[in-house]
Amino acid sequence: MPEPLRLMAILAHPDDETLGFGGTLARYAAEGVATSLVTATRGQRGRFGIADVRPSDEEVGRVREQELRDAAAVLGIREVVVLDYLDKELDAAPVGEAVAVITAVIRRLRPDVIVTFPPDGAYGHPDHIAISQLAMAATVAAAAPDPRSADPPHRVAKLYFRVSSPAEWRAYQSAFKRLVSVVDGVEREVHAWPEWSITTWIDTRQQWPQVWRAVQCHRTQMAMYESLGELDDADHQALWGNQQFYRAYSLVNGGRARETDLFAGLRPGESAS
Ligand SMILES: [Zn+2]
């Protein structure tokens, strides 16, 4: 039997995998792709339900890691690697060390395709920007010979940024209201990518009920997502029915034809174009 194709998501927080990438991860898992997830923090500084008394960061992190693992199981993710970085401080992590840690995971799990946040962190979140940079650096480092490494070098064939089309962004805005953050005194907001600039459109219509189940695993965050429960089927479709990516690089294909598959150029029997 041929080896399965392998897809890895490299992200910052518990729930990134579900809200941003859930449909894609579930779809590929369902077709037999070996999916994996690297989450850099336990989200230990995030919300913790509506409790008046907030437990320690450590306890929040412990609970959120379990929520992440439950959601990953719903999405069919085969392997989850949670790193020890601090929520909201990922951009202060020592870069050399963080790149080495992620590089080691890439060499061990040998993904064909990596997906991560875009360079603007989707909506300017500093942790998302940091993980995008770390994922790219680790992808480069993983391909280089390293006599100290337990595993051989590994060349990732394709790397993608998750981006939002104007239509997806409108659906998000109406479901979540205005997603805005203030960093260093400056307001940061999502900017949808123009349709023409999006290289890859993944049909995830079949997966939305599964994604919604995974969202509900993030129980401590549900106060924020509860309104999603009131959406009708059409709204859910608009929100989760298609996920868009920008092909940051590919060793196996190129050009401006719209891709509908992250593994275009890698399917057995397919010749590189
Ligand atoms: Zn996040």
Image (spheres, grey):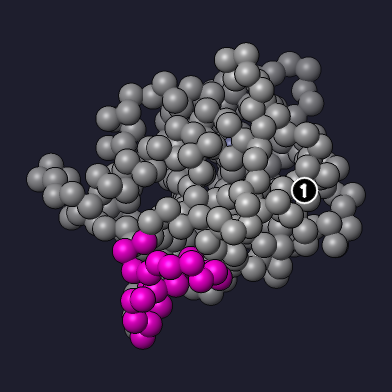
Taking the view exactly as shown, the residue that stands out farthest to the bottom is 269
* Place of residue 136 in the rendered image (x, y in percent of width and height, measured from the top left): 36, 44
Relative to 212, residue 131 above or below: above
Residue 28 spot, x, y in % from top left: 53, 67
Quadrant including the C terminus = bottom left
Hey, which residue is sitting farthest top in the picture?
185
Quadrant in which the N terminus is drawn: bottom left
Magenta stretch: helix, strand or loop mostly: loop
Residue situated in front as seen by the camera: 113 or 251: 251
245 horizontally vs 92: left or right: right
- Which residue is at 44% across, 25% downward? 91
Foreground: 51 or 187? Answer: 187
How many numbered callouts? 1
Can residue 270 be found in the magenta stretch? yes
- Horizontally, residue 232 falls left or right of residue 76, namely right
Does 91 lie within the magenta span?
no
Split into quadrants, the picture shows ligand 1 in the one at: top right
- Can residue 119 be seen here? The reply is yes
The boundaries of the magenta stretch are 250-273
Picture coordinates of residue 169, whole percent (x, y):
72, 48
Give the labeled residue for mark 1.
170
Q: Is residue 198 above or below residue 126?
A: below
Tell me where residue 189 sits by quadrant: top right
Callout 1: SS: helix
Q: Where is residue 61 drawn, in percent x and y?
A: 56, 29
